[in-house]
Amino acid sequence: MKNNRLEFIILYVLVASTALIIATLARISALSLGADSFTAFIVFIVVLAIEGAAYLSIQVVLQGLMLPWIARFLLNIPYFRNKTQSTSPIDEITNHITEPTTLEDIRNEQLQNKVKEQEEKLNVALNYTRKTFAPYISDGQIEILCGNLRLYADKLNLEKLRSIKTSKDLSSVDISHFGWNIWNHFNVGKRIDIAHFLKRVFPDILKDVEVESIKSHLKDEELKGIIKIQKSLTEQ
């Protein structure tokens, strides 16, 4: 809207400047032909009036005669006809009118953002888990482990967790470090929850370790083992 107004101002300034220049040249010509100052001034005013009338006449002719003819000509061209049919002035106005945002809309948007954030966080954890355990457990066992992670991330019943079998290369230290990384990433419960998770999912490796002991030693011996403690799973 501001650009259109500026264009009109520039156009009128150019037209007015041109009219003044022509009228001034007419006044100078009158003086050079021997007319007195008053007569030259009258010539200046008359020329300005003629220019104004000519400009208005041109506008009337263009708007009343030329533009409708040009419009009819353009409508015969398929491209412009389709453009006109696809977008009417009412449609353009409607497209610029947006429904007012309600509190319910805001709540729904926040809920959608939260779900998206949780999904992204889960995908990061699943990718980390697949990379970490791929050399030590089968594909089927990895999918079971990923299903267990979904239960943990969604705070669902840990009784539904399924145990998996891993390579003997992994130790209780490795599993504890894995548990710490997952707990620190999701931050959805207490350490005792991840300890129960590990005990149920890795019963073979942790068969001789109590849940409380797992909870207390999640982050012990950070530099030992195959699986190391990570500050963030996104910085792999």
Image (cartoon, rainbow, N blue to C red):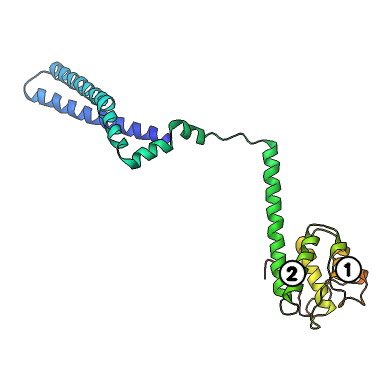
| Residue at far bottom of view | 169
Mark 1 or 2, nearer chain start = 2
Q: Position of residue 111 (x, y in %)?
A: 71, 47
Q: Residue at x 73, y 70 (%)?
A: 129
Q: For residue 68, what is the image quadrant?
A: top left
Any part of residue 221 in sight: no
Q: Position of residue 230 (x, y in %)?
A: 74, 70
Residue closest to the eye, 230 or 26: 230
Q: Residue at x 71, y 51 (%)?
A: 114
Amino acid at pointer 1:
Lys
Q: Secondary structure at mark 1?
A: helix
Any part of residue 165 in sight: yes
**Circle 1/circle 2 CB separation < 8 Å:** no
Q: Is residue 224 left or right of residue 99?
A: right
Image: 117 above or below 198: above
Q: Quadrant of the N terminus?
A: top left
Residue at the disc numbered 1 = 215
Image: 74 above or below 162: above
Alpha carbon of mark 1 to alpha carbon of mark 2: how far? 25 Å
Q: Residue at x 69, y 73 (%)?
A: 131
The circle on residue 128 is: none
Q: Secondary structure at mark 2?
A: helix
Image: 52 above or below 158: above
Q: Is residue 216 left or right of residue 102?
A: right
Q: For residue 226, what is the image quadrant?
A: bottom right
Residue at the disc numbered 2 = 143
Q: Is residue 193 left or right of residue 86?
A: right
Amino acid at pointer 2:
Glu
